[in-house]
Image (cartoon, helix red, strand yellow):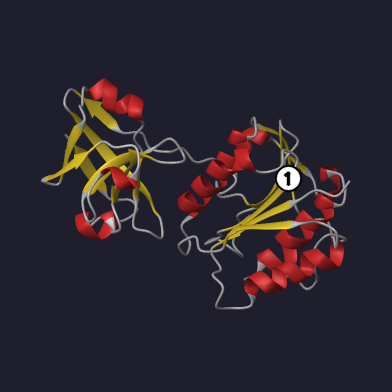
Amino acid sequence: MTRAIVFLTDYGLVDEFVGVCHGVMRRIAPDAPVVDLTHAIPRQDVMRGAMTLGRAARFMPQDAVYVGVVDPGVGSERRSVAVRAASDALLVGPDNGLLSLAWEAAGGATAAVEISADHVLLHPVSRTFHGRDVFAPAAAHLAIGMPLEELGPPLPVEELTTLELPGPMVSAGAIGARVTGVDGFGNVQLNVTPADLESAGLGPLLSVRGRQAPRVGIFGDVAQGQLAAIVDSQGQVALVVNRGSAAETLGLSVGKTVVLE
């Protein structure tokens, strides 16, 4: 049975890169449905891509083939890998940690290979477009049933590159948080959970950069233009502005730190 392919990149949609990869996959696996998770990962932001894949994994088909391309090391000595997870999901991409949060969400990596088989790669292999010549064909072959082991030699899973999400600094009355995401609405996701707020003893009204942010359930619980803190769809604390942008209001972007009091 043909598997679904979940596709994520930092290519954007201005150039033809995403469409060309679609074409490669369709020529090999014409019946495989492709879920374009996003192609708007900030350029070369491997951590953001890894977080996006990891958060989405529980909503994807259990046996999906993931192909992720956020690859600042393309053409270098970094390896091209395919990984089997405990859930039977398969993941294809550069060995730079991009896939690691997704395979953890799928139960952990159980097997891995380096993608190098001549009958899988598109020749000549470009040194700058492995999405087209390595990852898209590998994912498509896996989607139609090629055994993982046919893609190349085995790799010990413990040698795969992994990433870890930074945790917040929780103390009595305050939390040092990091911005892990800003969505298209300007909502600011933090590496903080409701349990962290409780551990710090923070009540229903937070202070953020000198502004008050009540903890609410939905955007409409505060007046238009007012800052608030909610628990978002991923279960993380997020700073929001009703019909506005918390990122602009607070001057925050991905990677910046902020103190909740």
Query: Residue 187's spot in the image, x, y percent?
Result: 34, 52
Q: Residue at x 75, y 53 (%)?
A: 115
Can residue 104 be seen in the rendering of this structure?
A: yes
Q: Is residue 125 above or below residue 107?
A: below
**Most distant residue in the left direction:** 210
Can residue 80 be seen in the rendering of this structure?
A: no
Residue under label 1, please give it. Answer: 64
- Identity, as a three-letter code, of the amino acid under mark 1: Ala
Query: Residue 175's spot in the image, x, y percent?
Result: 23, 32
Query: Residue 68's spot in the image, x, y percent?
Result: 62, 55
Q: Residue at x 76, y 55 (%)?
A: 139
- Left/right placement of residue 107 relative to residue 256 reads right
Residue toward you, 229 or 107: 229
Residue toward you, 37 or 244: 244
Total tally of numbered discs in the picture: 1
Q: Residue at x 43, y 35 (%)?
A: 235
**Most distant residue in the bottom direction:** 15
Q: Is residue 28 above or below residue 113?
A: below
Quadrant showing the C terminus: top left
Query: Residue 232's spot in the image, x, y percent?
Result: 41, 41
- Left/right placement of residue 247 relative to residue 211 reads right
Instruction: Tell me which corner region of the image, top left, top right, bottom left or bottom right, holds residue 125.
Output: bottom right
| Element type where label 1 sits in the image | loop
Crowding near the residue tagged with mark 1, few <14, some 14–19, many ≥20 C-alpha atoms within 10 Å = many
Residue toward you, 85 or 126: 85
